[in-house]
Amino acid sequence: MKYDFIQEYCLSKKGAEEDYKKEWDAIRYMIRGKMFAMVGNDNLNLPIISVKLEPEYGIELRDKYNDIVPAYYMNKIHWNSLYLNGNVPDEILKKMLDHSYELIFSSLSKKAQKEILEENKTIK
């Protein structure tokens, strides 16, 4: 896989957890049970990563990169998939992951956000 940094990058985020969803044959990255990234395959069995993005940002990326498409089997307005065998620069995927993480983190309650930030302080 071209983007071999995905697992480490996702798990480096505050409060991030990983699990494997057997029914989907996919690895999910979540914060408090809310998914911000999923690595799996599309209907042609091609490897993809799906992330949540602001709709305008997602459209901008889809227009610029052929390997970024509306997410497979997810809400196509908010979720986008990137083909892992494609030619999108690493930095773009990292920005997509950052954006997705921030969207999910900001959707958590202020209490949950504070707990995650406090947990991170005690770990370091």
Image (cartoon, rainbow, N blue to C red):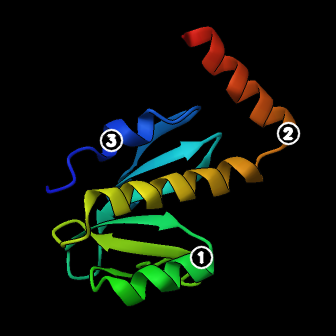
Vertical placement of residue 118 versus 20, above or below: above
Q: Looking at the rendering, which quadrant does residue 31 occupy?
A: top right
Secondary structure of the residue carrying numbered label 2: helix
Query: Which residue sits furthest bottom?
Result: 63
Q: Is residue 84 left or right of residue 55?
A: left
Sooner in the amino-acid sequence: mark 2 or mark 1: 1
Q: Is residue 9 left or right of residue 56?
A: left
Q: How far is mark 2 from mark 3, CA to CA?
A: 26 Å
Q: Which residue is mark 1?
A: 78
Secondary structure of the residue carrying numbered label 3: helix
| Disc 1 residue crowd, few under 14, some 14–19, many 20+, Cα 10 Å | some
Q: Is residue 63 visible?
A: yes
Q: Is residue 55 left or right of residue 67?
A: right
Q: Is residue 70 visible?
A: no
Sooner in the amino-acid sequence: mark 1 or mark 3: 3
Q: Position of residue 73 (x, y in %)?
A: 45, 79
Quarter that holds the C terminus:
top right
Q: Position of residue 12 (x, y in %)?
A: 44, 32
Q: Which residue is mark 3?
A: 7
Quarter that holds the N terminus:
bottom left
Q: Looking at the rendering, which quadrant does residue 18 occupy?
A: top left
Q: Which residue occupies 44% across, 50% down? A: 28
Q: How far is mark 1 from mark 3, CA to CA?
A: 22 Å
Q: Which residue occupies 68% across, 47% down? A: 105
Q: Which residue is mark 2?
A: 110
